[in-house]
């Protein structure tokens, strides 16, 4: 079914506050994602993505909602030639990505007994676009590593490229 939204839900044995910290604190995000976010985590605040010293900033890269322990939403990152080179993206794929509209991701955090229900919604995607295909593989792997880190203290090993 064609849709402009990707949704992924999991349950993590943690607290809402610890999950919030894992989504926003650079010490955590670097471990399971390889990214550190430079932002104030308030609606409208700009976000800089730091991936191994490669910084990506853009005026449209902003926090949309931030309710600690409950909800986090931001616009998806800007694609640059440096980013494409660093992740070994071929020119055709890169050009397709930069033509797609900017998307947004939302993390809904809900207590659920001894666990926390995390729902990741990545929307405003082109229904048949390149980004939708990439995040369809990327989010499950990333959230699995986040879950492992919170439950065991160890993130999953990075899959081979």
Image: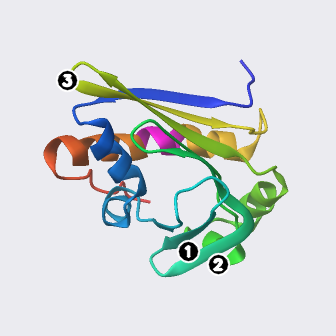
* Label located before the other in sequence (1 or 3): 1
* Residue 34: % across, % down: 41, 65
In this rendering, would 123 be left or right of 24? right
Count neighbours of disc 1 (C-alpha within 10 A) and say few if under 14, some if 14 to 19, many if 20 or more: few
Tag 1 residue: 86
* Residue 35: % across, % down: 45, 65
Q: Residue at x 31, y 66 (%)?
A: 27
In this rendering, would 98 be left or right of 155? right
Residue 122, numbered label:
none
Q: What range of the chain is rendered magenta?
A: 137-141
139 in the magenta segment = yes
Residue 91 falls in image quadrant: bottom right
148 w.r.t. 119: above or below: below
Nearest the eye: 43 or 151: 43
Residue 110 falls in image quadrant: top left
Q: Residue at x 49, y 72 (%)?
A: 51
In this rendering, would 50 be left or right of 65? left
* Residue 104: % across, % down: 67, 45
């Amino acid at each position: 079914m064609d849709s402009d939204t990707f949704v992924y839900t999991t349950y993590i044995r943690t607290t809402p506050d610890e999950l919030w910290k894992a989504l926003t604190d650079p010490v955590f995000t670097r471990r399971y994602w390889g990214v550190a976010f430079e932002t104030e985590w308030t609606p409208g605040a700009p976000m800089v993505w730091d991936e191994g010293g490669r910084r990506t900033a853009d005026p449209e890269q902003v926090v949309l909602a931030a309710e600690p322990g409950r909800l986090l939403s931001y616009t998806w990152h800007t694609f640059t030639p440096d980013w494409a080179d660093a992740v070994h993206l071929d020119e055709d794929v890169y050009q397709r990505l930069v033509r797609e509209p900017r998307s947004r991701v939302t993390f809904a955090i809900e207590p659920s007994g001894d666990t926390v229900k995390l729902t990741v919604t990545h929307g405003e995607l082109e229904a048949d676009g390149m980004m939708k295909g990439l995040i369809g593989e990327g989010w499950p792997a990333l959230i699995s590593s986040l879950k492992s880190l919170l439950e065991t203290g160890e993130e999953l090993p990075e899959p081979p490229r």
